Amino acid sequence: MKKLLPILCAIGLVIALAACATHAQDFTFLDDIIITVHAPELFLDLNAQALRNGDFDVVERETISVNARGEQRHVHVRGVLLEDILQANGLTQHDFAAVTATGADGYFISIPADILRSRDILLAYQMNGEAIDPRVIIPDERLMFWVRYLRELELVPHGAAQEVTREYAFSELLAELDEYTELFGHEGDETQALPIANMLAHLGNPHSDFVIITADDGLVKTERFSTFSQQLIVFAGTDLAPLFIGPSLPVGMRVHNMSSVQIGEVLVVF
């Protein structure tokens, strides 16, 4: 029996490796995944299987992913370029103000115009030889722009932002909304926050499909109004204030040290 153990272990290892190899090349799950790509001139339901069946040129990239803790990981990715998909439909990513990407897990990020003009945007279906749920990967950009479980891409045209006709200082709004502020626990600290829904009601409920958030570090983020309106603005108790945050808002969607927020024709300056 003792002599059989090494043999059985070896057989088990071979079976396990074979199963892993089969899984690594198993792309059948792509058959049921649809990625919606839409813009004023385009509405395209892209079957994710089309990312690897020869409809578009396959590209490969070596890059590094850096997470929020600064940990680095070298990755080899394979997929197709968003630009190739757009050009096949008479468009180019260079002509848009932003591309918003939404994952099946609810994660949402806006890719700004400077990245659209200078970077390749890869719709990847394989990473380090393993099949993956389709995701946005932008080599040499922050991991916040790498959207897993990709389900929707929306191209935002220039001029989508309305002209500002009303401007408010956030400090003045706080003085008028003091009764609506609340305590919010953030990374073990007790901070002070203002529910954005209350701020919007005080401003007369301005509305826009997208809200433009800018930060002191130069970040310009386009956020869906429906998402923005349900969050909080932390204004004290952390060095990251003013901080766009919410109890269930993914870390990658937060914006710290905000400098302004534009909701339709209304601009709030911090």
Image: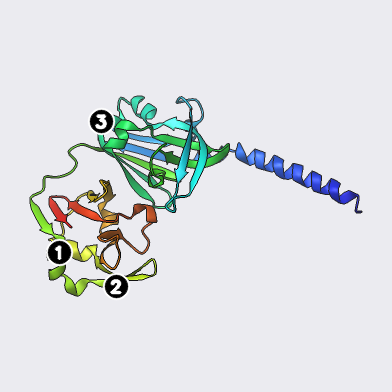
Q: Which residue is drawn at 38% across and 32% down?
A: 120
| Picture layout, residue 68 above or below residue 21 | below
| Picture layout, residue 6 above or below residue 44 | below
How are the residues colored? rainbow
Q: Distance between the residues labelled 3 and 1?
A: 37 Å
Q: How far apart are marks 2 and 1 (CA)?
A: 17 Å
Q: Distance between the residues labelled 2 and 3?
A: 43 Å
Contact? badges 3 and 1 (CB < 8 Å): no
**Residue 128 appears in the figure:** yes
Numbered disc 2: secondary structure = strand
Q: Mark 2 points at which residue?
A: 183
Q: In the depicted view, which residue is nearer to us: 259 or 152?
A: 259
Contact? badges 2 and 1 (CB < 8 Å): no
Residue 24, how many percent across, how many down?
61, 39
Answer with left or right where residue 20 lies relative to residue 133: right
Residue 238, how many percent across, how many down?
30, 65
Q: At label 3, which amino acid type do we have? A: Asp
Quadrant where the C terminus sits is bottom left
Foreground disc of the pair 3, 1: 1
Q: Which residue is drawn at 23% across and 62% down?
A: 196
Q: How crowded is mark 1: few (under 14 residues within 10 Å), some or many (20 or more)?
A: few
Q: At label 1, which amino acid type do we have? A: Ser
Quadrant where the N terminus sits is bottom right
Q: How crowded is mark 3: few (under 14 residues within 10 Å), some or many (20 or more)?
A: some
Q: At label 2, which amino acid type do we have? A: Leu
Q: Mark 1 points at which residue?
A: 171
Q: Which residue is drawn at 25% across and 59% down?
A: 229
Q: Residues within 10 Å of mark 2 (few under 14, many from 20)?
A: some
**Residue 33 appears in the figure:** no
Q: Name the residue under label 3.
A: 95
Numbered disc 1: secondary structure = helix
Residue 32, how many percent across, how many down?
50, 41
